[in-house]
Image (tube, rainbow, N blue to C red):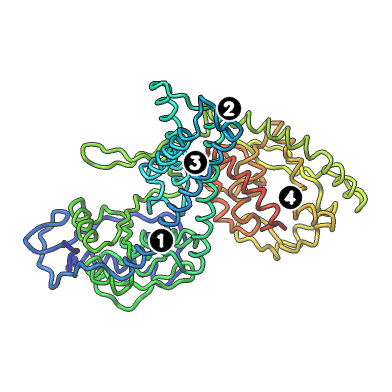
Amino acid sequence: MFLADRIHDRSKAQSDRKLAAVVDRRATGHRPLTYAGHRITSVADNRTWAGTPLRTASARPTTSMPGQVMTRARWQRRYVTNLQITDAIVVGGAVILAQYSRFAHVPSAAEYPSHRMMISSALFATAWLLALACFHTRSTTVIGAGNEEYRRVLAASIGTFGVIAMASLVLRIDISQGYIAVALPIGILGLLLSRWLWRRYVARKRVVGGYQTSVLALGESDAVANLANELVRDPEAGYRVVAVGITGYGPPRGEHLEVNHQKIPIVGGETHVLDRIRICGADTVAIAGAEHFGVQGVRRLIWTLESMGVDLMLSPGVVDVAVSRLVMRPIAGLPMLHVEKPQYRGAMRFCKRAFDFCFAAAVLTVALPILLVAAIAIKVGGRGPVFYCSERIGTDGRPFSMLKLRTMVVDADKQLGSLLDKNESDGLLFKIREDPRVTSVGRFLRRFSIDELPQFINVLRQEMSVVGPRPPLKREVDAYDSDIRRRMLVKPGITGLWQVSGRSDLSWEESIRLDLWYVDNWSMVEDILIIAKTLRAVFRRSGAY
């Protein structure tokens, strides 16, 4: 069954007016506006879509697979085959290494005959590989992006060892604990490392145009513009929007939608989308807001795309929410998306505070010699104090003095007014790539973020956290709207998503978005990942000035 070829005139006029606001302009990435849904006509046989009688369509689209679907299937098969080979090598190597390290010195021991250990190792490796397959660790829906692939690899590996341990206990099979102690960590680390290396390979391919998922985005004008902007935001994700369809648009008019400096052709309204899939080379249809199509409409679209081999993605309209907070729950036969509450309060907050204290104390202990050398260099470089205290706004709007090593001249604050016209930031921040107030010693300290080490003292004083939103100035907070003030629900951090995503190179809007994402989706695992990425960003000196 396919999409209809007739839209009510009034609905079409409304959609045209909405389209005028977004056609041939740059998408902003703001949350899509919500409009009243349109009634959509569908197919023949007097069936209805969303309760509306339908007219017979003039022609049915063919159901043969588009060429892009075959192209995607080929590279996915190659990639899955590579994963299978790599997994077999890693698992086999871990098992052989465990057997050799544990039994190489006692090959003829009566309790561990060599032939029995060879058979046990082969069965163990086979079970491990079967578990990786049963947990769908090589599913095309999880490989190459997100943490779900890693989670499944861990679950399959630990589950295999758990089953073997229970079986040995119940069946009274004697399995050396040393054997398992070697095979388990080496195998897990090898699998995770190999998946990461393959993921980097795929990311490099996608940046240069390979291993792509070609998407035709469909929905109302603002919603489809926002969806297209999100899909192409990260080139390493591998999504390429090749066309957009706008509900109520009518036949194609040769117009384009501009997203991230890319002009995407508008192939018409929902009536014309399926006929255009082969022309535009899409292998996936992404719908921004399914309420326009109705329950039966989405079902029939799924059936039609299935016969064509084209994937379907539905955007629920929820943005900047971590996957860990989303749970799909079937209620009365309907799949409902449940959004868990943020974890920035309660017991998890105590865990974060304990982690902050221990981590800050350890860093200050290790970095003490570096701080002493930096302090001497600052004093030798010119007059003035070693530390610079800047008033920042913390949790719930409480001010505090943030400590930093002084990297500017003494009267830097007084010179700020004369430099405002050179500001390179597009928001409330003040940033200059070549700030004349920065000293030569300060430029070196900033390059490696050494000037920020005293902020761990703020962490010990419970004014800051190791990871959190960027600490704002009072003048910035005074200009906040109600949404941005949400970032003050948690302590500001020495590092954060803004630090590992570009640092000073980020726009104001992007910095705020990352801070709000962190507030809503905080977790200890996320903090540890951000700390690891911070070290890489510091040594790469990306965005530091």
Question: Which callout, 1 or 4, points to the residue nearer the camera?
Answer: 1
Q: Which residue position is annotated with label 4?
A: 449
Whole-Å distance between the Cαs marked 2 and 3? 17 Å
Residue 276 seen from this side: yes
Q: Position of residue 383 (x, y in %)?
A: 92, 50
Task: Tell me if residue 184 comes above or below residue 72 in the rendering.
Answer: above
Question: Which numbered marker is on residue 350?
Answer: 2
- In the image, 461 versus 421, the foreground residue is 461
Task: Look at the numbered disc 2 and give the secondary structure of its residue.
Answer: helix
Type of amino acid under label 1: Arg
Whole-Å distance between the Cαs marked 2 and 4? 28 Å
Q: Which residue position is annotated with label 1?
A: 78
Looking at the image, the residue that sits furthest to the bottom is 254
Q: Position of residue 340 (x, y in %)?
A: 41, 36
- In the image, 161 versus 70, the foreground residue is 161
Discs 2, 4 touching: Cβ within 8 Å:
no
Discs 3, 1 touching: Cβ within 8 Å:
no
Looking at the image, the residue that sits furthest to the left is 45
Question: Which numbered marker is on residue 427?
Answer: none
Question: Which callout, 3 or 1, points to the residue nearer the camera?
Answer: 1
Task: Tell me if residue 515 comes above or below residue 32 in the rendering.
Answer: above
Name which quarter of the figure residue 217 lies in: bottom left
Q: Earlier in the sequence, mark 1 or mark 2?
A: 1
Q: Earlier in the sequence, mark 2 or mark 3?
A: 2
